[in-house]
Amino acid sequence: ATTKNDFVQEIKVAVGAVAPTVLNIKKVSEILNGQKVTKKLIKICIDEIQKVIKPIDDFRSSASYRHEVINALFLESVSELFNISFYD
């Protein structure tokens, strides 16, 4: 991700272990590019990610757990990239 003056210039979001192959979630990148990161905007992104991913239940973890982990990892990544806390 690249930023300038607290605005996202470019970001790419990809997730694994939630579909048969790694997913590049272009819609989330489109939502964030050119925007200032806010909690409301991140909620929109999480909703979009949840629409796209299709995790399965298997011996390693459940689909519901994978949904939760993707949310947590996305929040943690955005928190670090943009110095925003979502755990207030």
Image (tube, rainbow, N blue to C red):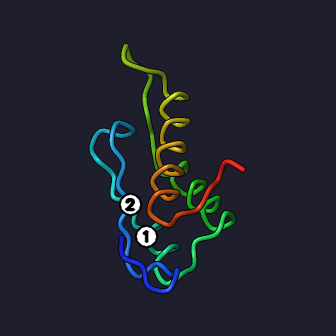
Which quarter of the rendered picture does the N terminus lie within? bottom left
Residue 67 position (above or below residue 59): below
Give the camera-side residue of 61 and 4: 4
Q: Which residue is mark 1?
A: 29
Residue positioned most to the front: 83
Q: Earlier in the sequence, mark 2 or mark 1?
A: 2
Q: Which residue is mark 2?
A: 13
Q: Is residue 88 left or right of residue 38?
A: right
Q: Residues within 10 Å of mark 1 (few under 14, many from 20)?
A: some
- Mark 2–mark 1 distance (CA, rounded to whole Å): 6 Å
Q: Residues within 10 Å of mark 2 (few under 14, many from 20)?
A: some
The amino acid sitting under disc 2 is Val
Q: Is residue 45 left or right of residue 19?
A: right
Give the camera-side residue of 61 and 38: 38
Tag of residue 7: none
Q: Are marks 2 and 1 in contact (CB under 8 Å)?
A: yes
Give the camera-side residue of 25 and 85: 85
Label 1 SS: helix
Residue 69, image x and y in percent? 50, 36
Residue 75, image x and y in percent? 54, 51
Which residue: 37% across, 18% down?
60
